[in-house]
Amino acid sequence: MATTILIIGAGAAGLMAARELSARGHAVTVLEARHRAGGRMHTIQPDGFTVPVETGAEFIHGKLPVTLALLDAAGIGYTPVQGRMIEVRKGRWHRQQHFVEGWSTLMEHLQTVTEDMTVRAFLNKHFSEDRYEELRRSVQRFAEGYDGADIDRASVMALRDEWAKEEEEQYHITGGYEKLVDYLYTQCVRQRCLLYFNSPVHSIRWQAGTVEVATTDGRTFAANKVILTVPLGVWQQPEPAIQFTPAISAQLDALRQMGYSAVIKASLEFKTPFWLEYERELGFLFSEEIFPTWWTQLPHPAPVLTGWINGPQAASFTQVLPDKMLQYALYSLAGIFGLPLVFLEQQLVGSQITDWGTDTWSRGAYSWDTLASRAARRLLREPVQDTLYFAGEALYEGAHPGTVEAALTNGLEVARKIG
């Protein structure tokens, strides 16, 4: 039996749910606060760039079944990421070993953990000696830089499960994630979904089997069910993102207990790939600069470097103007390569700074697990009276948290739960 369904948000989870539900014959309307679809997937080509720039999600982290199946169905190409990983410490370049000294001992201790604790508490308990100082720094850099996690709040069991996975090949989408967004959007339209942009939701009045959603411009939409794919960072703002009548206090409290990372991304195009003089197969650079992580476009030869600040460090730069962040990015490269700042400024032809922590409709980039996340997810994955459903990458349970794959998979799961 066909159901009228409202979906709040046209990001990966919302588009995936809309595509699946409309294919099953349901009447689907999507309300999106932005002027575009895609959410934290956003491909642009600013002035000065010869290639598309991913301001948000960029990589496919492994052979991810849902993402790759969609790309194959759409005929969208993807290529393996190439290049060496280099670590720069005190001006010296080292081809990075996957694990620092003591990592195997760390993993052995992690396997013995039966009661969850924060990463900081785990390190203090098992690796407090001076000889483990570099290991502690490495764990913190990895937890913050890759997962965006605050080690004073992050679940050590969750990070253990993620770190235990084998390294998998990564991919770039030919033309960027925009191609996937366009494919999903087109599928939804062909299946008679209604999509409204520039439509932030203000309030939801509901009872079992009936919802009335009001947008900030005074319009109202009625349905039998609603799927909320609002990013975690928006729910966690001091003022409630959406007013519910009657209230759903337990669910909103659960959303505030989960971890969510800030990310600042700097994409820079230069006249020439000057880094080839240092390492011809440069893929990723890891350093102790303000922008600690950088990568090239290999195997594509474009003279573009992308810098990344994640987690607590990114949050500390909230509200810093883009021009200042660009200077920090160039300072970081000057330190890494031992080059004069003026040389980099003369070489620079294009720049794009994106601070997801200040983005009104995301307030961050992706989720990570606190000690409370597992219980919070369990509650949020259950629909409220078969009427209010939550979806998004933060509610995914599987081997690839914090990814577009997580959002797509959870959107599909929620759609199939509705039937």
Image (spheres, rainbow, N blue to C red):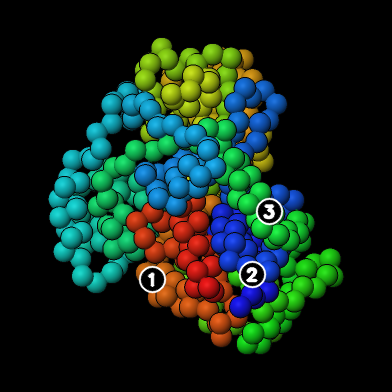
Distance from the alpha carbon under mark 3 to that under mark 1: 37 Å
Q: Quadrant of residue 5?
A: bottom right
| Residue 89 image offset from top left, x and y in percent | 33, 29
Query: Do the residues bearing badges 3 and 1 touch, measured as CB atoms within 8 Å?
Result: no
Which label number is shown at residue 26? Answer: 2
Disc 3 marks which amino acid? Arg
Spot occupied by residue 242 in the image (x, y as percentages of width and height)? 68, 72
Separation of marks 3 and 2 at Cα, in angstroms: 13 Å
- Tag 3 residue: 190
Q: Are marks 3 and 2 in contact (CB under 8 Å)?
A: no
Image quarter in which the N terminus is found: bottom right
> Residue 257: x and y, percent?
48, 71
Q: Which mark is residue 374?
A: 1
Expressed as whole percent of the image width and height from the top left, the position of residue 351 reads 63, 29
How many numbered dots are placed on residues in this image?
A: 3
Query: Looking at numbered disc 1 in the image, what kind of residue is underneath it?
Result: Arg
Instruction: Identify whether 298 is placed above or below 291.
Output: above
Q: Is 76 or 94 nearer to us in this picture?
A: 76
Which residue is nearer to you in this view: 126 or 105?
105
The residue drawn where x is 20% and y is 66% is 113
| Residue nearest the observer in this picture, 19 or 97 | 19
Q: Is residue 56 visible?
A: no
Identify whether 247 is placed above or below 254: below
